Amino acid sequence: MTIAKDVDEYVAIQKAAVDKNPECGNSHYNLAVGYMGKRMLDDAERELYEALECSPSLAEAYVLLGGICMQRGDLEGCLKHNRMAVKVRPGFSEAYGNIGFVELQRGNVDEAIKNLERATYFNFRYVQAFTNLGNAYLMKGRVDDAIEANHKALTLAPDFAPAHNNLAIAYLEKEEDALAVEHFDKALRFGYDVAGPIRQEIEERRAKLTT
């Protein structure tokens, strides 16, 4: 197996593989990955469709097509491709996670929760899905479930700032101010841009804790 020194060499190796075996879906998929690394989205998209022509059950290709749609701001296209991914591979956690994220962006919180729960069921180490699920639970007022989901994310990635942000909000809801302040501070420390109104409320609660 040849190991590429950089993305250009990787693309060249995969082009050679496609030329040698144009009916191999994995070769087209690997070339698409290389093109995505070079931000050549149109070329990546072409190769992914070629991959699916050769290997219709290649769920990863649908997910990458969904990712291209997301980068173009096409939520509907992202949703369509990820739904195809779980159709050809019903236990594909990444696709369920993507569907849940898109449904959350669209305001379909119940649908988001259903798919994010599936994502975390099929992959209990899926940090982003646990965090998005916690966010969705918050939107539904399921504060205790939100806290549980975000703590699961932090068990896997203790410095994952979005989960700390979610926990700060959840603990504000429960009026557990010390915990809210603790997770707010960690969210900031790990690089999260906490929303202005949350910052203001946290600082007001912090002030009460010290008086």
Image (cartoon, rainbow, N blue to C red):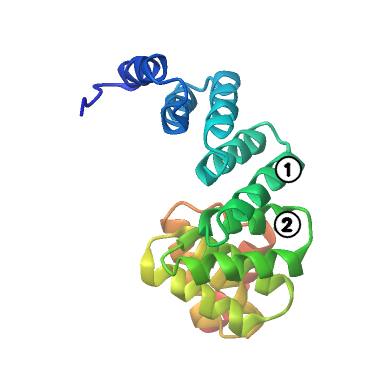
The residue wearing badge 2 is 103
**Does residue 154 appear to the left or right of 74 in the view shown?**
left
Q: Nearer the viewer, residue 12 or 130?
A: 12
Quarter of the figure with residue 90: bottom right
- Label 1's element? helix
The residue wearing badge 1 is 75
Location of residue 196 in the rendering, given as x and y in whole percent from the top left corner: 66, 57
Mark 1 is surrounded, within 10 Å at the Cα level, by few (under 14), some (14 to 19) or many (20 or more) other residues, namely some
Of the two numbered discs 2 and 1 on the same chain, state the one appearing first in sequence. Answer: 1
Tell me which amino acid carries mark 2.
Glu
Is the N terminus in the top left, top right, bottom left or bottom right quadrant? top left
Q: CA distance from mark 2 to mark 1?
A: 9 Å
For image coordinates 59% across by 39% down, the residue present is 67
Q: Is residue 188 above or below residue 2?
A: below
Location of residue 69 in the rendering, given as x and y in whole percent from the top left corner: 66, 35
Location of residue 111 in the rendering, given as x and y in whole percent from the top left corner: 74, 65
**Does residue 128 appear to the left or right of 155 in the view shown?**
right
Tell me which amino acid carries mark 1.
Leu
For image coordinates 74% across by 75% down, the residue present is 140
